[in-house]
Structures are given as C-alpha cells and as structure tokens.
Image (cartoon, rainbow, N blue to C red):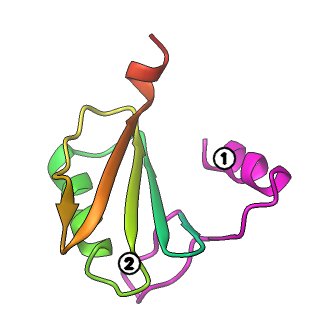
Amino acid sequence: LQLHIEKLFSKLEYDFVRHPKFDKENIPDFLFYPGICMEVKIKGTKKDIYRQCQRYCEFEQVERLLLVTSRSVKLPLEMNGKPCHVFNLSTAWL
C-alpha cells in the first residue's frame, strides 16, 4: 500500500520524503511539505496506532497528521495543537 501511495504522489510531483527519520524510534511513512505527516496502518492495535500518531505530533516538523488506515481508529481533532485527520480505507471502499 505504501508503495502504491508513493508512486501516485511521485507521479503527481508532490514534494515529500518517504520514511523521514525524526529520531531513532520515530520514522513515519511520509512527510509532505510543508509539515504534513502521513502514517499508513493496516495492522496493529488501535492503542499502538494512537500512541504512534501522538508521538509524531510531538515533533516540530509535523504541522498536521493524516492517518490512512483500514482499522477503526479515532483520533482527536488535535494532538499537541496539531490538526489530525483519519482516512479509513474500509469506509472508503463502501
């Protein structure tokens, strides 16, 4: 899924980095400029996904977070003052 997303955004010539390294343990799937962090999750517990998104919102490089997932994960409208959005693949396929 990440590879397909990467190919699409490359074709559209979006400015992004795949797997930017915020630190040793925090490496999101995509960082679009300016400051849009995208995490793609089709596995994992809701709790783990939430915590991961919460950690990413602690970094100054992140101005907004987008979670793309097949899980029914709910995020608050903001974390650490940064807007959060969820795109649920399961709902989108309906």
Measure the alpha-carbon separation of dots 2 and 1.
20 Å
Q: Position of residue 11 (x, y in %)?
A: 84, 51
Name the kind of residue labelled 2 in the image: Asn
Residue 70 percent coordinates (x, y): 39, 32
The segment highlighted magenta reads: 1-29
Locate the N terminus by quadrant: top right
Q: Nearer the viewer, mark 2 or mark 1?
A: 1
Residue at the spot x=38%, y=66% of the render?
64
- Dot 2 corresponds to which residue? 26
Q: Quadrant of the C terminus?
A: top left
Task: Classify residue 81 by image quadrant.
Answer: bottom left
Magenta span contains residue 14:
yes
Q: Residue drawn 23% across and 39% down?
A: 73
- Provide residue 36's location: percent of width, then percent of height: 48, 67
Residue 16 as seen in the image, left or right of residue 7: left
Element type where label 2 sits in the image: loop
Residue shown at 22% from the left, 67% from the top: 54
Mark earlier in primary sequence (2, 1): 1
Number of disc labels:
2
Across and down, in percent, residue 68 comes to 44, 44
For label 1, the crowd category at 10 Å Cα-Cα, with few meaning under 14, some 14 to 19 and many 20 or more, is: few
Q: Which residue is mark 1?
A: 5
The 10 Å Cα crowd at callout 2, few under 14, some 14 to 19, many 20 or more, is some
| Tag 2 and tag 1, C-beta contact below 8 Å | no
